[in-house]
Image (cartoon, rainbow, N blue to C red):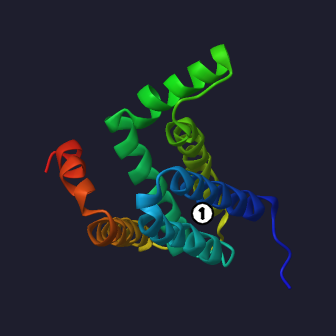
Amino acid sequence: MEKRSLLDKVIVVLCLIWIGVLFESTYFERDVLALHILQSLIYVAVIFLSLRHSKWGYGIGISIAALWNAYNTKSGFVFNAGFHQWHLFLTSGHITNPVQFVAPIGYFAHVLLIGALLWAYIRLREKSAWDPLILLGSLAGTFAYFLACIALTWPQFIPRMRHLLGI
């Protein structure tokens, strides 16, 4: 059995945090259960592939983290709603929306995941001129999978997503 590095373990923990964020959200908003189960499979794939030091795993992880953070930063979900819940918690000890409360946790877990995956890529001995295409392929595949998940399980979200993406 191959010994895992601290970096491998950090990537796994950050992915598990994200799976936890998804299922905490699902506990409070049951209508996203199917979407979040399918979305959690992305993080399972990142764990599986990154433990094999796969560039595809690194690309998928960077892609989902960047996509989610970009969308939710633009929507105000993290910095407006999420930090408002943290302000409530820190000033009164109470929160009104647990889903919004964990959004900043998810955001910063993604920031750390991107950093860890980039660091893991940098540490790879074998690099290729094709690596940027792997990242682009990972981004395209992750985006297509995520859109398909939304279209199949929560299509009412598509108009809001199109509006925020300007398409």
The x and y percentages for residue 51 are 69, 74
Q: Residues within 10 Å of mark 1 (few under 14, many from 20)?
A: many
Q: SS of the residue at dot 1?
A: helix
The x and y percentages for residue 6 are 81, 59
Quarter assignment of residue 152: bottom left
Front residue of 94 and 68: 94
**Amino acid at the residue labelled 1:** Tyr
Front residue of 25 and 8: 25
The N terminus - image quarter: bottom right
Total label count?
A: 1
Front residue of 156 and 9: 156
Residue at the spot 55% in from the left edge and 49% down from the top edge? 110
Residue at the spot 52% in from the left edge and 73% down from the top edge? 41
The x and y percentages for residue 143 are 33, 65
Above or below residue 102? Residue 17 is below
Q: Residue furthest bottom?
A: 1
